[in-house]
């Protein structure tokens, strides 16, 4: 089955991925008992929300310069974006933090976080091809670089805790 998405839908998926990432990191901070690591997770959640705002701005700019581009309707588009974001990076649950029961070990949470960051990078590398303008591609490249920095931060934390 081929799935066709327009640029607005792609940006909505990216927004949802970042929202899901923020939820995941906030839940991880709740589970981790160490204050230093909790602060790192909360900082990562903040960064993910900033990425969401960047994608939101890109979507708004695209919609303004391409009237009528969201022809499939806002409810359907939003639902598709939520579903695709869930499948693409953070599992099939609507709230990825639900996959954390609180019984996970530190290594398991860190491993999952690193995997999710890697999956985000793969998704955003593909998203870059849908970007309508060079400035959007540059912003996506910047977010990819930030996601790579997140992996470095998480790997350092993992090395210190294991």
Image (spheres, rainbow, N blue to C red):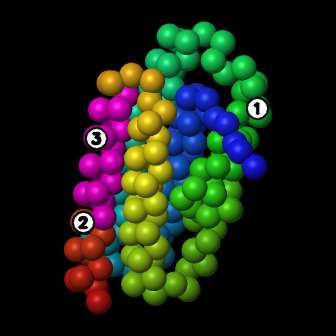
Please tell me which residue lies in front, 33 or 96: 96
User: What x and y, as percent, mark residue 65?
Assistant: 50, 10
Neighbor class of circle 3 (other Cα within 10 Å; few <14, some 14-19, many 20+) is: few
* CA distance separating discs 3 and 2: 15 Å
Q: Secondary structure at mark 1?
A: helix
- In the rendered image, which quarter is residue 132 located in? top left
User: What x and y, as percent, mark residue 44?
Assistant: 35, 57
- In the rendered image, which quarter is residue 102 located in? bottom right
Q: Give left or right: position of 138 versus 112.
A: left
Q: Give left or right: position of 152 versus 32.
A: left
Q: Which residue is mark 2?
A: 152
Q: Secondary structure at mark 2?
A: helix
Check the image and name the residue furthest to the front: 1
- Counting residues from the start of the chain, the first of labels 3 and 1 encountered is 1
Residue that appears at 46% across and 73% down: 112
Q: Which residue is mark 3?
A: 142
Neighbor class of circle 2 (other Cα within 10 Å; few <14, some 14-19, many 20+) is: few
Q: 73 above or below 20?
A: above
Q: Is residue 49 visible?
A: no
Q: Which residue is mark 1?
A: 75
Q: 88 above or below 79?
A: below
Residue that appears at 46% across and 60% down: 119
Q: 122 above or below 55?
A: below
Residue that appears at 54% across and 58% down: 89
* CA distance separating discs 3 and 1: 30 Å
Q: Is residue 16 visible?
A: yes
User: What x and y, as percent, mark residue 78?
Assistant: 69, 36
**Contact flag, marks 3 and 2 (Cβ < 8 Å):** no
> Which of the numbered marks, if any, corresponds to residue 49?
none
């Amino acid at each position: 089955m081929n799935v066709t998405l327009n640029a607005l839908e792609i940006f909505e998926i990216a927004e949802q991925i970042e929202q899901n990432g923020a939820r995941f990191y906030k839940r991880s901070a709740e589970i981790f008992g160490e204050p230093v690591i909790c602060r790192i997770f909360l900082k990562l959640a903040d960064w993910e929300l900033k990425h969401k705002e960047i994608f939101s701005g890109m979507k708004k700019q695209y919609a303004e310069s391409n009237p009528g581009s969201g022809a499939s309707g806002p409810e359907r588009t939003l639902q598709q974006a939520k579903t695709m974001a869930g499948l693409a990076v953070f599992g099939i649950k609507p709230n990825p933090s639900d996959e954390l029961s609180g019984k996970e070990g530190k290594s398991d949470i860190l491993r999952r976080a690193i995997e999710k960051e890697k999956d985000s990078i793969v998704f955003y590398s593909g998203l870059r091809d849908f970007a309508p303008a060079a400035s959007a591609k540059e912003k996506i490249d910047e977010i990819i670089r930030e996601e790579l920095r997140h992996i470095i931060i998480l790997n350092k934390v993992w090395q210190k805790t294991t």
